[in-house]
Image (cartoon, rainbow, N blue to C red):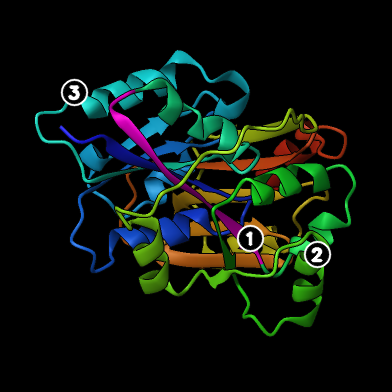
């Protein structure tokens, strides 16, 4: 049996990894894909946001898997390899604070896997600002420099500030994250040889999370008012919560983006906020979220 191709989708908090994977799942490539999702925190919101049948999505909720490379990852990969019918391609969605190269090393430890590239998603709206933050810039550099391909979200190739920032770190070629056809052709190209570069020793700052897995229903007005007053220090907030009028709300906060959309169903409810330990006060987040009560 031929080795199973494994690719890692990396990128910082809120870059658009889950959105890109949803588009890959819906793409016209004719492949059976299985997704391993490594979210950071107690609730795996990302797996709930993937538009995939449950048997094709495996959750890893033990935090930053690149720091631990715990047995959960190897057990999950082993489960995929032992299935009577294997998928055509295995994708691992790394958490926003993970080093994709360290996760991709699992392909070197398993003879039935073939390394098939790292795709790093860059948040076009916030990348320049993040690179100016000396606390997290080394982490972003590691995510970008290990990539076989770069996909830029939320902007186009004519963004002068973004282009200048990328050129400063020697990135001169990338694809638009909306160009799923081109990304699929490159990512799933079976004959394209790729070699995983040795992972550089890197550390990242300490992150903290706040979460609630039993969110109360909100009216849309209450929710918009609450999200407009997001406490400082939150780098990323994701939520699926009940709508008091029926159905659910899906919430995304990253940088200046405050996005609230309605959805009719929800497999998992919860809200999670992520920030640097030095900047995010968990008690303040708890008081803010519960202030509508």
- Gap in angstroms between the C-alphas marked 1 and 2: 10 Å
Lower sequence index among marks 3 and 2: 3
Determine crowd level at label 3: few under 14, some 14-19, many 20+ residues with C-alpha closer than 10 A: few
Main SS, magenta region, reads: strand
Lower sequence index among marks 3 and 1: 3
Which secondary structure, mark 1?
strand
User: Quick one: 168 or 288, which is closer to the camera?
Assistant: 168
Provide residue 50's location: percent of width, then percent of height: 36, 51
Give the labeled residue for mark 3.
82
The residue lying furthest to the top in this view is 71
Residue 48 lies in quadrant: top left
User: In the image, is 275 to the left or to the right of 23?
Assistant: right
Residue at the (32%, 24%) spot, across then down: 111
In this rendering, the answer to whether 102 lies above or below 226 is above
Instruction: Report the mark closest to the observer, 3 or 2.
Output: 3
Query: Is there CB contact under 8 Å for labels 3 and 1?
Result: no
User: In the image, is 90 to the left or to the right of 212?
Assistant: left
Query: Is there CB contact under 8 Å for labels 1 and 2?
Result: no
Residue 15 lies in quadrant: bottom right
Which label sits on residue 122?
A: 1
The residue lying furthest to the left in this view is 84
Residue at the (53%, 38%) spot, across then down: 196
User: In the image, is 87 to the left or to the right of 154?
Assistant: left
Lower sequence index among marks 1 and 2: 1
Please give the range of residues in magenta: 111-123
Which secondary structure, mark 2?
helix
């Amino acid at each position: 049996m031929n080795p199973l191709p494994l690719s890692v989708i990396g990128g910082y908090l809120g870059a658009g990894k889950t959105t890109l994977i949803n588009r890959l799942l819906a793409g016209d490539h004719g492949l059976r894909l299985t997704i391993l999702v490594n979210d950071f925190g107690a609730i795996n919101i990302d797996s709930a946001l993937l538009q995939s049948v449950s048997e094709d999505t495996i959750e890893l909720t033990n935090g930053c898997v690149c720091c631990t490379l715990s047995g959960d990852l190897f057990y999950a990969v082993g489960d995929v390899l032992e299935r009577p019918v294997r998928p055509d391609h295995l994708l691992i969605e790394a958490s926003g604070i993970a080093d994709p190269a360290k996760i991709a090393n699992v392909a070197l430890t398993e003879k039935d896997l073939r390394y098939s590239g790292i795709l790093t998603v860059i948040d076009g709206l916030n990348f320049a600002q993040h690179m100016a933050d000396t606390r997290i810039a080394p982490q972003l550099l590691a995510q970008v420099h290990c990539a076989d391909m770069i996909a830029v979200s939320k902007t186009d190739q004519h963004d002068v500030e973004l282009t200048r920032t990328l050129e400063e770190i020697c990135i001169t070629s990338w694809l638009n994250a909306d160009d799923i056809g081109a990304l699929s052709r490159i990512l799933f190209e079976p004959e394209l040889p790729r070699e995983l570069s040795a992972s550089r020793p890197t550390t990242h700052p300490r992150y903290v999370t706040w979460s609630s897995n039993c969110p109360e229903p909100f009216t849309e007005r209450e929710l918009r008012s609450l999200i407009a007053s997001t406490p400082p220090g939150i780098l990323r907030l994701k939520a699926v919560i009940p709508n008091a009028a029926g159905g659910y709300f899906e919430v995304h906060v990253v940088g200046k983006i405050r996005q609230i959309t309605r959805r009719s169903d929800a497999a998992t409810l919860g809200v999670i906020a992520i920030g640097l330990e030095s900047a995010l006060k968990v008690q303040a987040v708890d008081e803010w979220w519960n202030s509508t009560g």
